[in-house]
C-alpha cells in the first residue's frame, strides 16, 4: 500500500520561510519523479516544482523561481520544498506528487500523477 504524507505547512508572515517535507512508503522511491502542486481557494491546481529520480534536475514555476528550492533524499524516501521570501499569493494547499515519469510536469496535467499526498496548508499573512 502506497502512502504519501506531507508535513511542514503552517502560518507565516510575508517574507518568512517554511520547509515542506514529503515522505513516501510502499514504493521504490528512487523510481519516481517527485513534485509539488498547490491549489488556492477558487483557483486551479498548479505545478510548483518537480525533481527527477536522482535529484540532479529540478524544475520550477516562474512564480517561485529564485525563492523555492526542491530537493530529495532517496535514502530517507523523502522530498523537500524549501520556501523562502514567502508572499501572500503563495497561500494554498500544497500537495506532494509521485510519478514514474515527468510527463505531468511538462504537460501540467495532474491526471498523470501516480500518487498524491493529502496536502498541507501554507498560509502567508501580509
Image: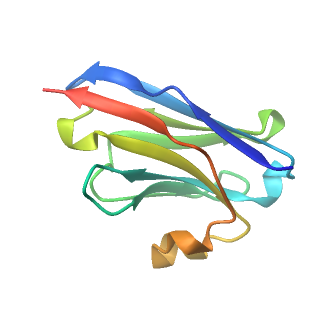
Q: Is residue 117 left or right of residue 15?
A: right
Instruction: Please determine whether, in this image, residue 70 is positioned above or below residue 100.
Output: above
- Residue 126: x and y in percent read 12, 26
Residue 27 visible at all: yes
For residue 53, which quarter of the picture?
bottom right
Colour convention? rainbow
Q: Is residue 8 left or right of residue 6?
A: left
Instruction: Please determine whether, in this image, residue 46 is positioned above or below residue 83.
Output: below
Tell me which residue sits at (51%, 25%) in the image. Answer: 8
Tell me which residue sits at (36%, 59%) in the image. Answer: 61
Q: Is residue 104 left or right of residue 28?
A: left
Tell me which residue sits at (38%, 61%) in the image. Answer: 46
Q: 70 and 87: which one is in front?
A: 87
Tell me which residue sits at (27%, 32%) in the image. Answer: 86
Instruction: Please determine whether, in this image, residue 9 is positioned above or below residue 103.
Output: above
Instruction: Please determine whether, in this image, residue 43 is positioned above or below residue 118.
Output: below
Residue 84 visible at all: no
- Residue 63: x and y in percent read 27, 54
- Furthest residue toward front: 42
- Residue 103: x and y in percent read 59, 76
Amino acid at each position: 500500500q502506497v502512502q504519501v504524507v506531507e508535513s511542514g505547512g503552517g502560518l507565516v508572515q510575508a517574507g518568512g520561510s517554511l520547509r515542506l517535507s514529503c515522505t513516501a512508503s510502499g514504493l521504490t522511491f528512487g523510481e519516481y519523479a517527485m513534485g509539488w502542486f498547490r491549489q488556492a481557494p477558487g483557483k486551479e491546481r498548479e505545478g510548483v516544482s518537480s525533481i527527477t529520480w536522482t535529484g540532479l534536475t529540478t524544475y520550477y514555476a516562474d512564480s517561485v523561481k529564485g525563492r523555492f528550492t526542491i530537493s530529495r533524499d532517496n535514502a530517507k524516501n523523502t522530498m523537500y520544498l524549501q520556501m523562502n521570501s514567502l508572499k501572500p499569493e503563495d497561500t494554498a494547499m500544497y500537495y506532494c506528487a509521485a510519478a514514474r515519469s515527468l510527463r505531468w510536469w511538462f504537460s501540467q496535467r495532474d491526471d498523470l500523477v501516480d500518487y498524491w499526498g493529502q496536502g498541507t496548508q501554507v498560509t502567508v499573512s501580509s
